[in-house]
Image (cartoon, rainbow, N blue to C red):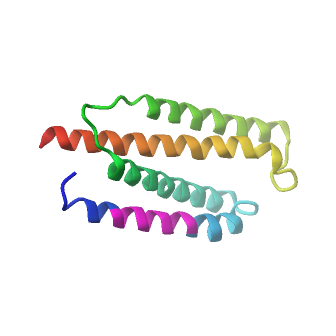
């Protein structure tokens, strides 16, 4: 990685981390139980910033010798989608999110693990492509 990209990636990492914490601490608890549209938008904003955190980590920690495979991104996408479907199935069966949080822990963990894998994999691959282009 060239020296001029590293400070920008550190700024991206710090700002994405701050936005992730701010969204998940202030907006998600306020909107998710009561307002589905605003809660959904807050969740998507938190998910995007969370993925950007792992994208910047993947770019900063990458030292590729060759072009890495996107297998981890594929696993992350599958984990994200399966976890989202599991959460929707729990909701369709009638398990209330507000009173019984336990069953939703596994799908939520899967969503965030999948997003982390997607972000890290894309960041790692981007660093490798930049090295090849140079």
Q: Is residue 35 left or right of residue 40?
A: right
> Does the stretch in magenta take in 19?
yes
As drawn, the residue found furthest toward the left would be 134
Tell how many labels: 0
Residue 9, horizontal then vertical, whole percent: 32, 60
User: Does the magenta segment cover residue 113?
Assistant: no
Residue at position x 27%, y 31% in the image: 67
Magenta residues (range): 10-21
Asked if residue 59 lies left or right of residue 118, the reply is left
> Which residue is found at the position 70% from the left and 69% from the top?
30
Question: Can you give x and y, in whole percent of width and height, for residue 66 in the image?
Answer: 25, 31
Q: Is residue 68 above or below residue 97?
A: above
* Residue at x 28% of width, y 64% of height: 8
Residue 84, given in percent of the width and then of the height, sits at 64, 39
Between 64 and 33, the one nearer to me in the picture: 64
Asked which quadrant contains residue 44, the reply is: bottom right
User: In the rendered view, would you say 44 is above or below 87?
Assistant: below
Q: Residue at x 87, y 55 (%)?
A: 99
């Amino acid at each position: 990685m060239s020296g001029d990209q590293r400070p920008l990636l550190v700024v991206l990492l710090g700002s994405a981390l701050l936005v992730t914490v701010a969204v998940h601490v202030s907006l998600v608890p306020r909107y998710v139980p009561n307002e589905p549209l605003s809660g959904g938008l807050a969740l998507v904003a938190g998910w995007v910033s969370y993925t950007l955190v792992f994208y910047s980590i993947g770019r900063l920690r990458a030292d590729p010798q060759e072009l890495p495979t996107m297998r981890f991104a594929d696993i992350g996408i599958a984990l994200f989608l399966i976890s989202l479907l599991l959460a929707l199935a729990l909701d369709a069966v009638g398990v209330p999110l507000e009173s019984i949080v336990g069953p939703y822990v596994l799908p939520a963990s899967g969503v965030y693990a999948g997003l982390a894998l997607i972000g890290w994999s894309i960041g790692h691959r981007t660093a490798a492509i930049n090295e090849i282009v140079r």
